[in-house]
Amino acid sequence: MFNVPTDLLTVSDLTYRIKEVLEYEPELQDVTVRGEISNCTLHGSGHAYFTLKDEDAQLSCVMFRRYAETCNRSVFKHGTRVVAQGSVTVYPQRGNYQLMVTGLRADGEGDLYQEFLRRKEKLLAEGLFDPSHKKPLPPYPRTVGVITSPTGAVIQDVLRTLQRRFPAADVLLAPSLVQGEAAPASVMLALEGLVRRGGVDLVIIARGGGSAEDLWCFNDEGLARAVFACPLPVVSAIGHETDFTILDFVADVRAATPTAAAELAAPDRLDLLAALAGARQGMLTHLKYRLYNGLQQLDDLGDRINWQKKLLIERQHNQLDLLAATLRQHDPRLFLEKGFSMTLRNGKVVRSAAEARPGDVLETVLGDGRIRSVVVEEDK
């Protein structure tokens, strides 16, 4: 419990007193500061808002249009080391102090960027970025491992995208730090856990946007070597499309954003359904062709059978005609019509005179009739 003083200040009172102290301090009204550009926004009004950083601190800055127009646009690039001149002011609405910059020039590339280039060249020379080492992503993953912070928008974006595109895939979250000195070890531990678990088809390492300093943990050399040695395909999705880290170069596939990583990791079910519909239509067309072709072959076979049948019948008719002609040539009636006769005894042909005995009744067959006679005597 404390007593409320009579000279109670409002937030505005205190803020404006601080503003007066800072803005009327001569040593703070004409200062020159060296630092690295970060979180720069070039507003449509022409004003520039950015942060100056070094290893231990950061300073909010504003540069109004009439001063920003005098600068080369490249000086506002993230990581650029600059020398800024201006005055310290207080922005009461936010309750923070800032440097109102009136002059800005490049002071060479920042230390962080130089270290980034050094590590990149070293790992490039060792072959860690070689395309021949890149592993292809599985076309239909059953389980997708995601290494990211368990809170925030990144994991939600990945989950929504995978659920929309390929709900058949399971998502396995491996929680990890994604910023700060402990982040590389945390990511490597999560990666090791996914590999050891088994059954994971690919891994997404994701983090949302941030300054070069915020993303610096993904330039860690140990992390790069761990990803290179990982037996699973790894997709990197760090920051925004314009952000690049060492992890992006060593990963098997680099995605511009976490959402893009999820799109790369799994096929779109709508595309699959369309492909299945196309395959179904193709199969139906093929079956119709096979059926039509089969019917044509049956018709052709039927025609051949009918032709063979007709040919066989014609041959049989010809053979019958030939047999009939042969039989006609050997028909006894032809000889009888020529004046020959045939003698029968008891219905059997008499071929020799010795076959007839006196008293036998013989029947002589002529061309125009029959004559019966009785044998009177036998002439030998």
Image: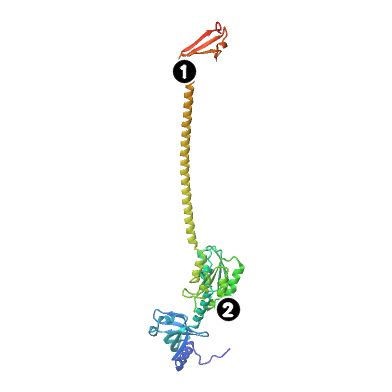
Tell me the residue at 47%/36% (across/down).
308
Q: Against 267, is 313 above or below?
A: above
Tell me the residue at 51%/77% (across/down).
121
Front residue of this view, candidates 328 and 13 = 328
Q: Earlier in the sequence, mark 2 or mark 1?
A: 2
* SS at badge 1: helix
Q: Against 168, is 308 above or below?
A: above
Front residue of this view, candidates 154 and 327 = 327
Q: Which residue is mark 2?
A: 182
Label of residue 334 in the image: 1
Front residue of this view, candidates 305 and 2 = 305
Q: Is residue 176 visible?
A: no
Residue 371 image offset from top left, x and y in percent: 50, 10
Q: Is residue 334 visible?
A: yes
Q: Quadrant of residue 191?
A: bottom right
Tell me the residue at 47%/15% (across/down).
336
Q: In which quadrant will I find the C terminus?
A: top right
Crowd rating for badge 1 (residues with CA inside 10 Å; few <14, some 14–19, many 20+):
few
Front residue of this view, candidates 324 and 4 = 324
- Give the mark count: 2
Crowd rating for badge 2 (residues with CA inside 10 Å; few <14, some 14–19, many 20+):
few
Distance (Cα) linking label 2 and label 1: 127 Å
Q: How has the structure been colored for display?
A: rainbow
Q: Please, what is the three-letter code of the amino acid marked with disc 2? A: Ala
**Residue ranking furthest to the top:** 376
Which tag is nearer the camera, tag 2 or tag 1? Answer: 1
Residue 1 image offset from top left, x and y in percent: 58, 88
Q: Quadrant of residue 31?
A: bottom left
Q: Please, what is the three-letter code of the amino acid marked with disc 1? A: Leu
Residue 169 image offset from top left, x and y in percent: 55, 64
Horizontally, is 249 left or right of 74 in the view? right
